[in-house]
Amino acid sequence: MAPNKTADVIGAGLAGLTAATALAQRGWSVRLHERESEIRAIGAGIYVWGNGLATLEALGLYDQAAVGAHVGQVLESRDHRDRVVEEIPINGPGQARVLTIMRDRLIDTLIGGAKEAGVEIRTGSEVVEAAPDGSLVLRSGETSRADAVLAADGVNSRIRRQYDVVAHRASMKQGATRLTVPRSADFVPAEDQGKYIEYFSGRRRVLYTPSSETSLYVALVADEDDRPASRIPVDTASWIRSFPHLEKLLSACAGVPGRWDTFQFHTLTRWSMGRLAFLGDSAHPQPPYLGQGGGCAMMSALGLADALSGSDAPVDQRLRDWEYAERPTVEHTQRWSYRLGQLNYVPDAARTPLLKGSGLLPALGASRMRAARTIPTGAGRFAGSAPAGS
Ligand SMILES: Cc1cc2nc3c(=O)[nH]c(=O)nc-3n(C[C@H](O)[C@H](O)[C@H](O)COP(=O)(O)OP(=O)(O)OC[C@H]3O[C@@H](n4cnc5c(N)ncnc54)[C@H](O)[C@@H]3O)c2cc1C
């Protein structure tokens, strides 16, 4: 019997955990290296759109991930006077699917799936070098060689920085504070409580996201140089001045532990070199205006496992085939999430007429849904049904 193919996966985020599990489920021997002493979820809640949901289903993990998740019926954008600018119905027949979930629940589910599939998870295992011949070097000095090495080590990827592969980098100059507060009937009117709502005011946005029966994920988005906006703990007085109609919600953010992250965007000249591939945010980070960075990472990781397992071609060829299949959808999504970020720079008075008058809204809606409606390679049989959850 031929020996199993081997993979070293670098980084246990959404991309690395998905790729490792999908490969192990396809008979590969997989070692997953995480530099931290434990695998941690970063952020508060997360939107998982159809492509991410279909990936979870293909891994056999959807039911666990969806326990307690929130399934909204509409996604709304509102202007500075709390008037609805855009409304996208979701989760109904023929509509895009999305659920929102706490990040630690999603990561814990993926860790469980990886263990079940037989992935060897090594925490405290920092990779300092990886090469196109499949070799890598750990901080401990240990070396290893595998049939494939997947660098899923995040947006500041050390491994990617060893190679001259960045084709284009855009400076976003925007970021967000993410935090979780207990849900409360006081925050928004009763008819809005189950919705996903993005509020605009000047160059700031507030994202209201129920993520379980009891938890509300709040994102406070602003320019990087808007010092009061990026302060931790949250400068609630400053935020209430921008969003007086959200006073109760913003007051509840006072003193709550949160995390400020700046947004990043780059594309690569290529996603692989020989047996080494770049995956997830290492390859294609995007600002979170479509809630698709993680969905694209998971979708593409599943596609990678399928490409590596689906033919007898050499590994380098399979990795090129994978990039050819996945890249158009991922880069389309990156471009649109970048464009949506530019809406922050449009004055309040001009934003709504610009969106409505230019006919941008239908285009935005359709583009927002493109990756969400993409069925990841190997997950076709799961497409279409609305998610179940709270
Ligand atoms: C404000 C904000 C909101 C977002 N909202 C959404 C959303 O709603 N929906 C969505 O789909 N996406 C969202 N995203 C994007 C999403 O979070 C990312 O795209 C996704 O988490 C990327 O996963 P990853 O596995 O590629 O990288 P990461 O999650 O960064 O994982 C990388 C892992 O590699 C480890 N590591 C790094 N270097 C090494 C090394 N040398 N050796 C070993 N291990 C290493 C790190 O410790 C880490 O665990 C959002 C992002 C932001 C900033």
Image (spheres, rainbow, N blue to C red):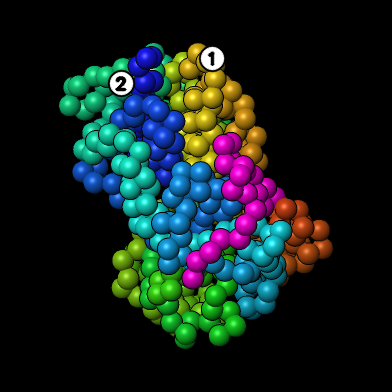
Q: Out of 316 and 331, give the one closest to the viewer.
A: 316
Residue 282 appearing in the image: no
The span from disc 2 to disc 1 (Cα, nearest Å) is: 23 Å
Q: What stretch is highlighted in magenta?
A: 367-390
Check disc 2 and report the residue beneath it: 136
Residue 20 lies, in percent from the top left, at 39, 35
First in sequence, mark 2 or 1: give its number: 2
- Identify the image quadrant of the N terminus: top left
Amino acid residing under circle 2: Leu
- 380 part of magenta stretch: yes
The residue drawn where x is 46% and y is 60% is: 66
Check disc 1 and report the residue beneath it: 313
The residue drawn where x is 39% and y is 38% is: 21
Dot 2: element? strand
Query: Is 222 situated above or below 35?
Result: below
Residue 146 lies, in percent from the top left, at 34, 19
Amino acid residing under circle 1: Ala
